[in-house]
Amino acid sequence: MDRQKMLQQLNDVAQWDIIVIGGGATGLGCAVDAASRGYKTLLVEQDDFSKGTSSRSTKLVHGGVRYLAQGNIKLVKEALRERGILLKNAPHVCHNLAFIIPSFHWWQKWYYSIGLSTYDLLAGKLSLGKTKMLSKKTTMQLLPAISPDNLSGGVLYQDGQFDDARLAVNLAQTAVEQGAAMLNYCKVIALNKTGGNISGLVVEDVLSGIKYTLNGKSVINATGVFTDNVIAMDDAGHEPIVSPSQGVHIVVDEKFFPGKQALMIPKTDDGRVLFAVPWHDKVLLGTTDTPVKEITTEPKALQEEVDFIIKHCNRYLSTQIGHGDIKAVYAGLRPLIKVKGQKSTAILPRDHTTIVSKSGLVTITGGKWTTYRTMAIHAIDNAANACKLPKQPCVTDTLKIHGYTQHATSDATLNIYGSDAEKIIELSNQQPSLKEKIHAGLPYSKATVVWAVQHEMAMTVEDVLARRTRALFLDAAAAVEAAPMVAALIAGLLQRDDKWQEQQVLAFTAIAQNYLAH
């Protein structure tokens, strides 16, 4: 992906078929879908791809066991089908993971087992494996960290896991391969109308300050928690439709939760599910559900949210976790759809909504990572219909995502790159200095930084340390220490001066404060 070439297309293309606003899971899915149908497609994102909510998930590709408990069979069925498709089309970045629900009363084992057998049944041919009831002894062998107090056994079921920001960059690459133009750091500042209908927009390249006026037959608003801001550009008097909810996760060393299985507690004090999930040789613990009024690109975990996760985890673990054990804390905002009279965001539906305004603006919001592809189908179908584009069938159910491979590489830390892994190894062999790690406590080499800048449109230190690698999410303090070296590498590749490096390190260090446990 070459950002200069993409910017050139803004001058060269007279009219786009579809312009997507938003580079998170939904927007990226829309770009892949539209481009693979043959529509002339552009995506613009005001920050970096998956900068917001889409890089801050629980890293699960799942049907949603708790939606089953809520009776939302339709959503579970759709999500389970999508889980199967995603694991098939992006095996390098998505994989099976076994989850265990511990039971503390004899009847719980049967209760969970019946419910999860229904989960398997709904997955049909795309099931990842049968649910099993476990004895207390087996549960403790598979979950070495579980406290034996009152434990009577457990239930094991299969679900999917992925790396959200890595999948996001792979979707951007897939869209480019299908002919789309994809631009990060490109902010929409106005929607243009002709005869009351949206006919394009004005964008500003945040990095250069240059403005572009673009013509498009259809514009799709896929901006997550910023949905209402874009709708307001179209209709200043609209009623807000998004009710943002904050979800927080903490990351600790795997010594607190050894083993390959994940833990799932079906109900916490606030009605949410609690997870302990092995991820990149660390463990994610979460999540919370806190309604928020202020929408920001860098939401901050509240102290009570962190306390809540620690308190709940310590109820179930034999080794107690303290605040000093936290390697990283991250918060994301869910764009939940408002329901009249509903105050608790924990029980708001995770379904998505598609709206076509009088002027033709197509808005798609709600949903979750697992269903990003079906959200895209609905958005593109509506957009094509609204602006009378020639009908083309969706092909993304069989479209392999960039990096697709079923083969592991000689360097396990690079497997997440899929088919690009061998190219990164080759780069390291050509320039042996790039084999050096960016930090002793992180698994990433200098070669992955060079690759991110040259092939994945990373423009800043944060792009590299938060999303192209996951350093900031795995060990925030180590990421801060690695920032000067990363800034120097990027500066050499993008011809930036010492002042730029200094500013980048300061900016990244400021952002990283939100990820450090206080």
Image (cartoon, rainbow, N blue to C red):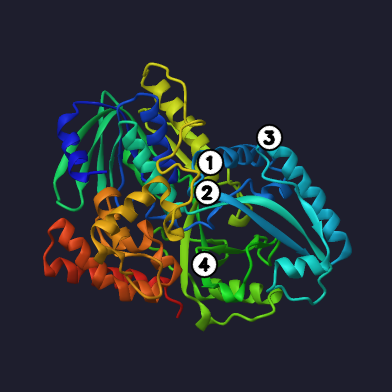
Q: Tell me how far mark 3 sits from mark 2, CA to CA.
A: 18 Å
Asked which quadrant contains residue 231, the reply is top left
Which element carries disc 2, helix, strand or loop?
Answer: strand
Residue receiving disc 1: 86
Q: Tell me how far mark 1 sits from mark 4, CA to CA.
A: 23 Å
Which residue is at the front of the view, 429 or 446? 429
Which residue is at the front of the view, 242 or 515? 515
Q: Which mark is residue 418?
A: none
Residue at 32% x, 76% y: name it: 481
| Lower position in the chain sequence, tag 4 or tag 2 | 2
Q: Tell me how far mark 3 sits from mark 4, CA to CA.
A: 31 Å
Asked which quadrant contains residue 216, the reply is top left
Type of amino acid at the residue the image marks with label 4: Asp
In percent of width and height, residue 37 lies at 40, 24
| Lower position in the chain sequence, tag 1 or tag 3 | 1
Q: Assess disc 3: are there few (<14), some (14-19) or many (≥20) residues with their C-alpha within 10 Å of its C-alpha.
A: few
Residue receiving disc 3: 125
Residue receiving disc 2: 94
186 relative to 292 in the view: left or right: left
| Lower position in the chain sequence, tag 3 or tag 4 | 3
Type of amino acid at the residue the image marks with label 3: Lys
Which element carries disc 3, helix, strand or loop?
Answer: helix
Q: Can residue 293 be seen in this view?
A: no
Q: Tell me how far mark 4 sits from mark 2, CA to CA.
A: 16 Å
Residue receiving disc 4: 281
| Lower position in the chain sequence, tag 1 or tag 2 | 1
Callout 1 touching callout 2 (CB < 8 Å): yes
Image vertical order of residue 456 relative to residue 74, above or below: below
Q: Quadrant of the C terminus?
A: bottom left
Residue at 68% x, 42% y: name it: 72
